[in-house]
Amino acid sequence: MSEHDEHDEEAFAEQTLIQAIENQLEADSPPAAKATLNKLTLVGYEREEILQLMALVLAHEIDAMLRDDRPFDSAWYEQALRALPELPGED
């Protein structure tokens, strides 16, 4: 696979994750998504930056789900969103 293809795949994956976050915000589900957006907006983050941080948390949980062959852990996900801008595994 060329570097170009890998970059395209990463960009596509990020866009897919960001779209999923947008859908969560739209549906207000989980409520932690909108709460996180509001909190980070108040402390000066740009919307695009916030969506990228939230997408990283979602990607982290999806990776763990696939690795451990388990269902989506919504409690962990909401807790990780509320911990932003600190990312999972950075403590």
Image: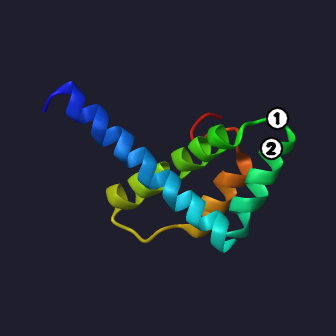
Q: Which mark is residue 70?
A: none
Judge by depth and name the residue closer to the eye, 37 or 67: 37
Give coordinates of residue 68: x percent, y percent: 36, 60
User: How many callouts does the rendering have?
Assistant: 2
Q: Residue 70's image quarter?
A: bottom left
SS label for mark 1: loop
- Residue 35, above or below 88: below
Mark 1 residue type: Gly
Determine crowd level at label 2: few under 14, some 14-19, many 20+ residues with C-alpha closer than 10 A.
some
* Number of other residues with Cα within 10 Å of mark 1, as a class: few under 14, some 14 to 19, many 20 or more: few
Asked whether, in this view, residue 13 is left or right of residue 57, the answer is left
Q: Residue at x 43, y 71 (%)?
A: 71
Give the left or right position of residue 70, taking residue 41 as reference: left
Q: Which residue is mark 2?
A: 41
Q: Quadrant of residue 69?
A: bottom left
43 vs 58: above or below? above
Q: Which mark is residue 44?
A: 1
| Quadrant of the drawing holding the N terminus | top left
Q: Which quarter of the image is occupied by the C terminus? A: top right
Q: Give the percent coordinates (x, y) of residue 55.
A: 53, 49
Q: Do residues under tags 2 and 1 come within 8 Å of each other at their CB atoms?
A: yes
Residue drawn at 69 percent across, 60 percent down: 33
